Image (tube, rainbow, N blue to C red):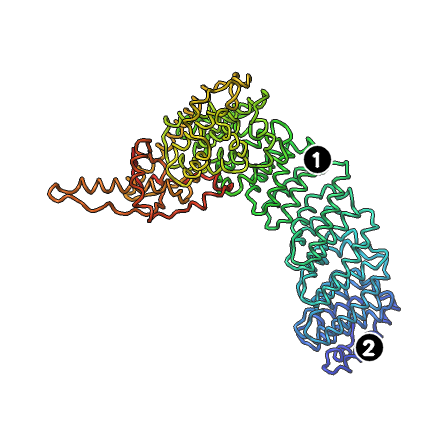
Amino acid sequence: MNNLSPIPSIVLKNLADKNTDKRKTGAQEIEQLIREHHSNDDQAVIRAIIKQISTEYTDSAQGNNKKGGLIGLASVAIGLGTDAYLYIQEIVPPVLRCFIDHDSRIRFYACESLFNIAKVTRSKILFFFNEIFDVLCKLSSDLDPQVKGGVQLFDRLLKDIVTESPTFDIDKFIPLLKERLYIINPFCRQFLVGWIIVLDSVPNIDMLIHLPKYLDGIFKMLRDQNKEIRNEADKALSEFLRELQTAENVDYGSMVKTIVPHCISSDEFTRLSALTWINEFILVGKKKLLPYCPLLLNGILSSLSHQLVNIEKMASLSNINLHKLILETNQDFPVGEFLNINTQHLISNSVQSRLASLNWILMLHSKLSSGISSYLTDLFPPLLKTLSDNSDEVVKLDLKTIAKISDNTELFDKLIQNLVILFSNDSQLLRTRGNFIIRQLCLFLNPELIFRRFSNILGNSGSGSGGNGNQDGNGENSKEINPEFASVMVQTLNLILLTSDECVEIRRNLRSLSTPESRDLFSVLYTSWAHSPASLFSLCMLCQVYEHSCALLSKFTEIEINVNFLMEMDRLVQLLESPKFMALRLQLLEPEKYPSLFKSLYGLLMILPQSSAFETLKNRLTCISSLGVLNLIPKKQNEDGNNSNNNEGLKDINFNNLLDHFKEIQVSHEKFYKDRNNQINNNNNNNNNNLDIETPFNQQRQLPYGIQSYINNKITNQQHQQQLTMSSPSSPITAPPPQVTTINSNFNNLNISSSSSSSSNNNSTGNNNNINNNNNNNNNINNNNFSSQPKDMSSSLPKYL
């Protein structure tokens, strides 16, 4: 033993003894020794005693030495009394180092020692609060129950000291608290939440101002599996939320950024709590929340449709309150970000979220008026894409939104142009929802303007395989229009025009052609309806220009008659039998007054193969006086539908130019199909197989009975002729031609002349038994059938003249 030691050797021996009582005796002797030196103001000796105990005992590798050292340091503090704080920086650190010792008994002695030191120093111990808090947090999950008990005892004392201390440094503590809140150990979490609640209850400690820094950690505790921890965390959050209602300086921005991610949490309790906070923020913060409304909306829209009713109700309530806040405010807010959040949720899996987003866009448009126009470039594409939505309710609201936004000529033109491009790129959308979309659009916008704009775009496409680029209302070149698409689009528009309730006024004006506007509309529609012969003929029937209908029928002999054409005519007959053409059928009762109507319908009858449509039209016409009788009745002036004799305004319409335009459009269609067939043949040659290229508008569809029979007989006759040609003269083939079943491959460019039509019909009887007759399905008109293009069979069948 060093003779210069300030501690007697007998005392040091007792401190290191393995017997607890002897260690206590040694501690008492050190306490007495410290009192003596303190009374003599021997600070140097006291510091030497503390240093010796720390280095030779608490930092020793021997367990008994450590225990004695910890008891000795506590005795030093007790001996110093109220002046212990003067030496606190020498006394506390050695004790704190023992808190992480591997021996649980050493850890317990460290808790006991620091407890006694804290009792003496009181608020002065808070100089080491962060270090003490950190070791207590770690030991709160200690496996030794005695250590846990010691921690809990010291924890209560420390809370009392902090509560009564006016000098607690909360700013220094918050970073440590924020870091420790992400510990997932349940005992540590319980320890941390307990401290948060205690600190929040201290009047002179403002925990609310630091809330954004540790709020996320508390929210993460809400998903803990321990119910007690969840309840404690919820209790803390509820108290903070109550305090926020009366607080003045609140950092809403940081807290919104923290809470919104929890609105999409998979844990229902966390999600509901986050939505509750958002709703309270909106009600309390009001205009202070405007800069952060896009973030709030993002959290709300994600929960509008949820399996838990409480979450759905809270999200709906928050959405309503935010809607009121935005609607009533006159202050600026980030409109661009707000619209961006809405467009993102247009592709949400939730129907309610998509509907809410559309309602928000509508509200912003009505509130800001021109303020939303600068965002339309980014807004239009997602709105148009939403037209493909599976929900009719979403599509209806989307169309209403688009219509409201397109409230001026420039935006309206852009809308129709984009719709044409959308339908052109998405043939499935045109076939399945095209009719519905256009009709809904007519409810919100002027139907006549819609048809005019569609017609201008489709009618200005020129000749060529793909159609020449047309110009829109702004003089800009629009996308080249595929003739095949243009034909399907015109058929869709024609069906809407002739049958929908939204177009009643248009039909009324077109029937009379009594105003310059109605005659101009007829001319405009004519240019685009020329893409579909049957649609154009039905338009002439609607407008009662029967003389021109006859001239149009004569033009049909100059164009290539294919299966598409015959299919359109077949559907046209079905359309003429619909209630919308009842007035036309009643005009058949006055053959002397409408001779051109009879001639047009008989001309149509001559074009049709002997199918179900042929029989339908034939039966209708045979109910009236025969055509021969008409020659006995002189034609009277100012009759025969709408003509230049009874309607002077029709002289302004150049019907010859319209016929030439029709022929030009049909030539462009022929060139398009020819080029496409050449491409198919080239691909077949390159790949050495029968490659079938199907365009977006070629759909597999059963042909009507008469047309299918006609095609089958043509194929049968050709096969029979080939067999005769290939056979030698000495062994002629006398077997009957083979039976041909229904064709299910693509056929588009079958050339049919009127002369071959009559010859083929004689051979159709023998083959009819093998043909699948679907006439009953063709008798009912529906939107999808009329607006779809018939199937293309050119890839698998030869051409016939």
Alpha carbon distance from label 1 to label 2: 87 Å
Q: Identify which residue, 293 or 492, lies in the foreground.
A: 492
Which label was assigned to residue 25? none
Q: Is residue 685 above or below residue 3?
A: above
Q: Is residue 676 above or below residue 83?
A: above
Query: Mark 1 packing: few (<14 Cα in 10 Å), some, or many (20+)?
Result: some
Spot occupied by residue 94 in the image (x, y as percentages of width and height): 73, 67
Asked if residue 628 shows in the view, the reply is yes
Q: Residue at x 40, y 25 (%)?
A: 555
For the residue labelled by badge 1, is the local secondary structure a helix, a strand or a loop?
helix
Q: In the picture, residue 98 is in which quadrant? A: bottom right
Spot occupied by residue 566 in the image (x, y as percentages of width and height): 40, 36
Q: Which residue carries the number 2 mark?
A: 29
The three-letter amino acid code for the residue at tag 1 is: Ser
Asked if residue 4 shows in the view, the reply is no
The three-letter amino acid code for the residue at tag 2 is: Glu
Q: Does residue 64 appear left or right of residue 245 in this picture?
A: left
Q: In the picture, residue 464 is in which quadrant? A: top left
Q: Identify which residue, 247 or 756, lies in the foreground.
A: 756
Q: Does residue 610 appear left or right of residue 277 in this picture?
A: left
For the residue labelled by badge 2, is the local secondary structure a helix, a strand or a loop?
helix
Spot occupied by residue 473 in the image (x, y as percentages of width and height): 55, 24
Which quadrant would the C terminus be assigned to in this image?
top left
Query: Mark 2 packing: few (<14 Cα in 10 Å), some, or many (20+)?
Result: many
Q: Identify which residue, 77 or 493, lies in the foreground.
A: 493
Q: Which residue carries the number 1 mark?
A: 366
Depth check, mark 1 against mark 2: the one in front is 1
Which quadrant would the N terminus be assigned to in this image?
bottom right
